[in-house]
Image (cartoon, grey):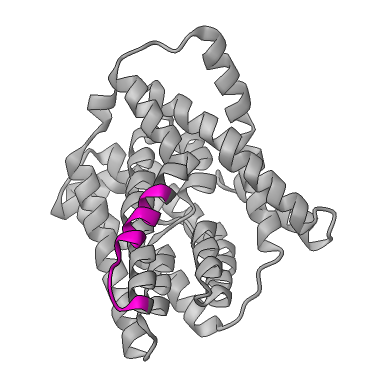
């Protein structure tokens, strides 16, 4: 399977973390290096070398957002029916739609599906971080205070500006929009630094999973089902039938939606003290199951599944 080398790197990181060869502190520093330096360099270089006006696709953004919102609302309704509060419902809904697109999706999808995957993946990251990343903070803080204070909006805005993935994509798109060529030495520097993102990110994912525990398993399985099955299914329906987009871009969007729960959901949950163990279990279970589920989705896409679906539709 084409995805196995990527998951083998995650397994290697998990083994290093589980045996304490890589301590939690070491994992934290590796994650920081990847997040602030290697991945940022990769994202900026990818974005800066794109044709900005060709990549900016309103239909693609709308289709992905609409499908994600449908699953988000479903997870929220199920949480409310179970009797949990607004804060926990927001965190569970976040688990249902926010995948590990930055650390896992960027390196894997670009290598497996080609350089054309860069544009759609960038748009997905923007929607996830700007829209849903802001929404969860607003719901949690609003749920606690009973109102939306100006300070919350300010906090959300500053958080987005400090996020290196958002800033590197924005700066890269800005560079591309100005149609400036990247000087050769700068491009080579970014390529070398960005080259560390793929192995570093995958290893860091595995090492961080070693500290995760599987509690509230039934809820975690439900949220993993939302993320690995319902989310890509909803995106597939949206991009193939509701707001049809280019078949290649549709395949990239479906593959990105099939990725396991992102680690940054745990960071938010831990920061606000809202069900961190539930999120931890969802990340662990969804990542383990994604070895098979993501492989099947990628095989379906590369095997012409999107074209067949369009032909039969």
Left or right: 77 in relation to 29? left
Residue 49, given in percent of the width and then of the height, sits at 39, 20
Residue 75 sits above or below residue 57 on the image: below
Left or right: 209 in relation to 46? right
Left or right: 260 in relation to 300? right
Q: Residue at x 34, y 28 (%)?
A: 173
Residue 253, given in percent of the width and then of the height, sits at 33, 47
Residue 34 sits above or below residue 290 on the image: above
Kindly report the secondary structure that dominates the magenta region of the rendered protein: helix
Res 91 quadrant in image = bottom left
Res 39 quadrant in image = top right
**Residue nearest the observer in this picture, 89 or 241:** 89
Q: Residue at x 47, y 35 (%)?
A: 110
215 in the magenta segment: no
Q: Residue at x 39, y 10 (%)?
A: 181
Res 302 quadrant in image = top left
Q: Which residues are magenta?
A: 145-158
**Residue nearest the observer in this picture, 161 or 20:** 161
Q: Residue at x 39, y 28 (%)?
A: 171
């Amino acid at each position: 399977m084409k995805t196995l080398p990527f998951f083998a790197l995650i397994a290697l990181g998990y083994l290093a973390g589980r045996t304490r060869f890589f301590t939690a502190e070491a994992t934290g520093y590796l994650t920081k290096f990847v997040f602030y330096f290697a991945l940022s360099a990769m994202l900026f270089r990818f974005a800066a070398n794109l044709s900005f006006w060709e990549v900016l696709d309103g239909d693609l953004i709308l289709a992905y957002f609409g499908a994600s919102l449908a699953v988000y609302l479903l997870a929220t309704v199920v949480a409310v029916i179970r009797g949990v509060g607004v804060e926990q419902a927001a965190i569970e809904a976040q688990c249902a739609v926010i995948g590990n697109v930055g650390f896992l999706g960027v390196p894997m999808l670009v290598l497996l599906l080609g350089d054309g995957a860069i544009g759609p993946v960038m748009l997905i990251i923007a929607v996830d971080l700007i829209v849903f990343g802001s929404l969860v903070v607003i719901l949690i803080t609003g749920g606690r205070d009973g109102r939306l204070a100006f300070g919350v909006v300010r906090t959300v805005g500053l958080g987005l500006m400090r996020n290196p993935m958002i800033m590197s994509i924005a700066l890269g798109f800005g560079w591309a929009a100005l149609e400036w060529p990247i000087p050769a030495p700068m491009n080579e520097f970014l390529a070398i630094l960005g080259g560390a993102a793929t192995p570093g990110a995958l290893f860091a994912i595995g090492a961080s999973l070693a500290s995760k525990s599987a509690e509230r398993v039934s809820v975690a399985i439900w949220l993993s089902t939302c993320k690995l099955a319902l989310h890509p299914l909803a995106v597939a329906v949206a991009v193939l039938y509701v707001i049809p987009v280019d078949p290649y871009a549709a395949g990239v969007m479906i593959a990105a939606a099939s990725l396991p729960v992102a680690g940054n959901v745990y960071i938010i949950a831990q920061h606000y003290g809202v069900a961190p163990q539930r999120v931890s279990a969802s990340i662990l279970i969804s990542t383990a199951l994604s070895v098979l589920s993501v492989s099947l989705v990628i095989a379906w896409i590369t095997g012409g599944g999107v074209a067949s679906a369009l032909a039969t539709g």
